Image (tube, grey):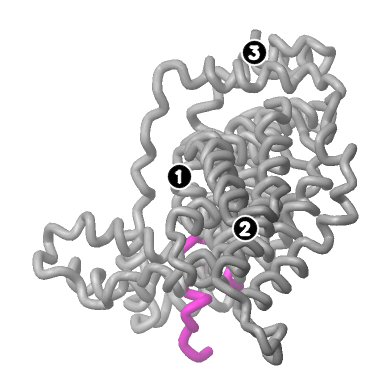
Amino acid sequence: MDEAAAVARARAGDSEAFRLLVDAHSRALFGLAYRMTGNKHDAEDVVQEAFLKAYRGLDRFDERSKVGSWLYRIAANCAFDVLRARQRRDRHFASSDDGPSPEPPASEPGPDRMAMGKDVRDRVAAALARMSPRERAAFVLRHFEDQSIEEIGRALDLDTSAVKQSVLRAVRKARQVLAPLAGAAS
Amino acid sequence: MSHLNDDELVLLHYGEDAGPETNAHVETCADCRERLRGLSTTLALARSPEVPEPDEGFETRVWARLQPGLALPEPAGRFRLLRHTAWPRAAGLAALAAAVVVAFLLGREFPSRSQPLSPEVRERVLLVAVGDHLERSRMVLVEVANAPRGELMDASVQRAFADELVSANRLYRQTALRSGEPALAAVLEELERVLVEIAAGPDDLAPAELAELQRRIESRGLLFRVQVIQSHVRERERESVPRGAAS
């Protein structure tokens, strides 16, 4: 049974047919969710939520689309929701008395510039942590996932100018922490 | 045309539409090409984080958790604790009550009292208030922890309760810290994180959001810890009653 047939059968009430999609796409969606949330638990929950939303939205699936792309968009949107929920939580505690937020690494790279893999990863993580949920989602989808601004807009329910601005702001933040290393690498 | 700005270079780097003039300019301007190369070098450093490989049974687990939600059963018996109590009216006053208690204990609300409160009375006031607060919070946690998995949860009542309890919790936590009660403060801190999560969430909790909340409650044994500390608080409250006053 191909995926289009599985969708048709699931639409007709055969929930078992939906399992074929779960088996085929869970790992890819997990990868996307992990890159967006940076957290294994969150990523697993995003996968779960994405499939549930997909099942409940089967009637809205356009048969001319690819099932994988459709699921991908739903998962991206769910991961975006997780990022926003996380920000709400962090804001509360940042406004409380729980001490300062973690600082990004110092602007100077470590002494061993050629063995700087960890340093780069730390800096990328620091840059992502400084991004708003929208910036982070847009950056991950544009930079890591190679989605166009238009595709990102469709996935996150945002207009293209908002996505473009988010990508640009995110890139500025990424460059701030990566620029010193770029000098060292070249 | 003047040189390209950074944003135009970023759009060019990603192959997005930056306008025909921009494309034409970069073809002929060595400076802008060099800046574009520098930008690409910098951004190439930002590689995708390594994604951990899910275990072998991942798809089976996803399906097992998903399957009950696909039947879309009508949730039943929800909110039996919260809706059948008189708390909805009382809970709205939780934060105000906490503020009054704390102010009272700190002597801010009643500065002109000729007889300062004894430490025993202050402690008893705090214990009673914290005991009530823990009981309210525990019931919210129980409702969330026991909600059916894999289903959408109408958490509007719990969310409203949590919203009220967060402010009160913060005051009690700060008071506990100042009063040298680190164990109580630690539990209140953990409790506050979950209450914030519930309060900041939507009225309708999606299965993934519900699962995350349940995981947070379960993973740290929060319900049990709240229950233990609540029991200690009640015990101390009883001990703090002056002899002869209890009868």
Residue interval drawn in magenta: B1-20
Query: Is the residue under label 3 in contact with that under label 2 (CB below 8 Å)?
Result: no
Q: Residue, x 12% and y 61% (percent of image)?
A: A114
Q: Is residue B245 above or below residue B214?
A: below
Looking at the picture, which amino acid does disc 1 mark? Asn
Give the label, 2 or 3, closer to the camera.
2
Q: Position of residue B244 (x, y in %)?
A: 67, 53
Instruction: Determine if the magenta segment contains residue B4.
Output: yes
Q: Position of residue A137 (x, y in %)?
A: 56, 55
Q: Chain of mark 1?
A: A
Q: Is residue A105 above or below residue B137?
A: below
Q: Where is mark 1, residue-wise?
A: A39
- Crowding near the residue tagged with mark 3, few <14, some 14–19, many ≥20 C-alpha atoms within 10 Å: few
Query: Is the residue under label 2 in contact with that under label 1 (CB below 8 Å)?
Result: no
Give the label, 1 or 3, closer to the camera.
1
Q: Are marks 2 and 3 on the same chain?
A: no
Residue positioned most to the front: B244
Looking at the picture, which amino acid does disc 2 mark? Pro
Along the polypeptide, which appears first: circle 1 or circle 3?
3
Q: Nearer the viewer, residue B123 or A54?
A: B123
Q: Residue, x 68% and y 67% (percent of image)?
A: A162
Q: Nearer the viewer, residue A34 or A174?
A: A34
Q: Where is mark 2, residue-wise?
A: B242
